[in-house]
Amino acid sequence: MSSVKRFVDSVIIITGSSAGIGRQTALEFAREGASVVIHGQCRERLEETEKLLNQEGIGPKRILSIIGQLEREEVPKQILEQTLDKFGKIDVLVNNAAAGCKPGITFKAGSDANSLANLDYLFAVNLRSVVQLLEGALPYLEATKGNVVNISTSGALRPLRSAAFYCALKSALNTLTESYAQIWGPKGVRINNVSPGPIKTLIFERNGICGTKKEQASFDTKNNQIMSRLGLDWISEDFPGSINPNLTRGLDIRKSATLMGRYGNVEEVAAVIKFLASKEASFVCGANWLVDAGMAIKAIPVDISGEIIGEISGEIIWKN
């Protein structure tokens, strides 16, 4: 646990903090004295985040837990209203929550991934809710000289063909951050982006890909449900009781696409978020910090003959 307490008496909202990067970010801020507003859609996982905060010695006076779906226009309003009702101010807003597909839609070929219904849903979660939270929080952030950290993705700079809408909307978020920084920077409110690359998260671990204890795990019912949501339900059909080598291979490609040849950890992303929110980053505004081990800048290994010579980011480099 950090002995430095840079956020004592600060109130910090972290959307999508029921797991992964958001959960770790909430823990990091709370350890340094902040009161945290945690948010998610799954009650069980959100309660687990609260339990972890309690284990760190953070009591209910410093925690506000809000369950809700950000695509519903009233939920961002509820987050802001309940935060102000309990704490009376906002010092930092971390827009971490995001969605890759509408529930019931997958990235699977032939699915509705490129449907307008999916686009509308992703727009509501990944961009509209961010604008709602920004517009509602910024006057209060001006009063506290606070700041915003939006969570984007390195995929906004190197788009994935299987996630066109997600990458496009995150690219829009990058531009939104720059535009809002130009408006609010002169008022003393810093707004920045963090763009993670391939990070070890809960969904990777559940599929036996990250973490030594689970590398040899078999697919259970829960994992099969997750695979179905991802459009990868054929895994359990083609490789019953085992880890699908094609899935593992795809993620290994993603790992090798970084300059450091490994996945990132949620702690590494949370540390950057926390830094950007701190006074140490007081001269950083309108920036997009990549936390991807150089994935967005790594050269694609194609020679002039056009022969297939490698793979990067899960995409095959074909010969002409």
Image (cartoon, rainbow, N blue to C red):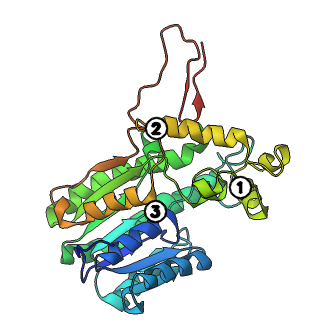
Query: In this rendering, would 13 be left or right of 257?
Result: left
Badge 2 density bin: few <14, some 14–19, many ≥20, Cα 10 Å: some
Residue 70 position, x and y percent, is: 52, 70
Residue 64 position, x and y percent, is: 43, 85
| Viewer can see residue 276 | yes
Query: In this rendering, would 80 be left or right of 200?
Result: left
Above-or-below relation of 314 to 76: above
- In this view, the mark in front (3 or 2): 2
Query: In this rendering, would 134 be left or right of 101?
Result: left
Q: Amino acid at mark 1?
A: Ala
User: Dot 3 lies on which element?
Assistant: helix
Residue identifier under label 1: 217
Residue identifier under label 2: 261
Badge 1 density bin: few <14, some 14–19, many ≥20, Cα 10 Å: some
Alpha-carbon distance for marks 2 and 1? 23 Å
Residue 141 position, x and y percent, is: 25, 73
Q: Amino acid at mark 3?
A: Ile
User: Dot 2 lies on which element?
Assistant: loop
